[in-house]
Image (spheres, grey):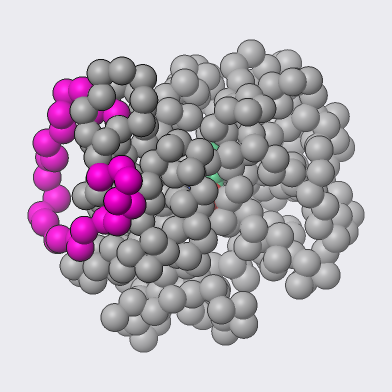
Amino acid sequence: NCSKGEEIFSEGILTRFGNIELCPSSGILNYGQGLFEGLKAYRKEDEGILLFRPEENALRMKMGADRMCMPSPTVEQFIDAVKMTVLANKRWVPPHGRGALYIRPLLMGTGPNLGVKPASEYTFLTYASPVGNYHKSPMNLVVEDKVCRATPGGTGGVKAVPNYSPIYKALTQAKAKGFTEVLFLDALTGRNIEEGSACNIFILKGNVISTPTVHGTILPGITRKSVIEIASTLGYQVEERNVPIEEVFDAEEVFCTGTAMVLKSVVSITYQGKRIEYKMGEETVAQKLHATLTGIQTGLIEDKMGWTVEVD
Ligand code: PMP
């Protein structure tokens, strides 16, 4: 816990998973003053446990805290809390190659505030849950041209709690029609692709991999950043730029990235009733990038980038 002004979080304590008490007039409940993160712990073949780029999550939370007028834990406090959570739940880290322990850090205004203003007290907590691998099922995207996920000047570039429930409706309706994910367009022109509800997007044509620029409306995904670096190392030309929806029709491959899904191929995109299909399978660039990324994350491939952190 921390009071605004002190900017120092007291030492963390470990408690059993359970309900927490919140003041009815807390900032998180009334005004959505909260941020979260998501990262994974993977078991290596030799039983060791690896975290993937946890300092990136800590830095993203710091950036978001500034946007949401909250104090944030230091990078060290953040990583210590994550490690403590993983160690306490070691038996729940799935066997090598069979999934991961997903860790959810949460920062929120817990002090009372009736008026519209930053809370006077804050809580940082982390919890965890084992998750399986679910990259095998292909994605069918539908382009959403009515609901905007983020607007310039808003909070789309940070992992703010209030970013997510406004897209439930679009997502629920898309799922009811058999789609797996929604692809949002930019709010200003409605012509450029942005991202999914919880993933970034890439398109491939020839040797060129393109992905929308992060400039405040797209979440700067840690998987996105890692895939850009891996693809460049493997000899692909990676372009971060505005990607008009028309280019999506012309792409050979499309894939999405995120901590939960890691890297998933998109089998089709539907836009205004028109469905475009993409290359899938073992021979794709997406598959190659997936193999390298998961190899590093699970300790199968030497981590030359220094991305993984041992937990013990
Ligand atoms: N965009 C949004 C809106 C997300 O919620 C996520 C998941 N954190 C991502 C992209 C992917 O980011 P990351 O690779 O850091 O998980």
Main secondary-structure element of the magenta-colored stretch: loop
User: Is 50 on the left or on the right of 123, as rendered?
Assistant: right
Task: Give 303 or 171, whichever is nearer the viewer.
Answer: 303
Q: Position of residue 67 (x, y in %)?
A: 50, 38
Name the residue located 66 percent from the left edge and 27 percent from the top edge.
152
Name the residue located 49 percent from the left edge and 23 percent from the top edge.
167
- Whether residue 286 is situated above or below residue 184 in the rendered picture: below
In the image, residue 284 lies in the stretch drawn in magenta: no
- Whether residue 248 is situated above or below residue 11 in the rendered picture: above
Name the residue located 21 percent from the left edge and 28 percent from the top edge.
112
Give the residues in magenta.
3-28
Q: Is residue 217 visible?
A: yes
> Could you say which quadrant of the image residue 281 lies in?
bottom right
Residue projecting furthest to the front: 5
Quadrant, the C terminus:
bottom left
Task: Give 34 or 134, whichever is nearer the viewer.
Answer: 34
Q: Position of residue 180 (x, y in %)?
A: 53, 33
Residue projecting furthest to the right: 206
User: Is 21 on the left or on the right of 209, as rendered?
Assistant: left
- Whether residue 247 is situated above or below residue 255 in the rendered picture: above
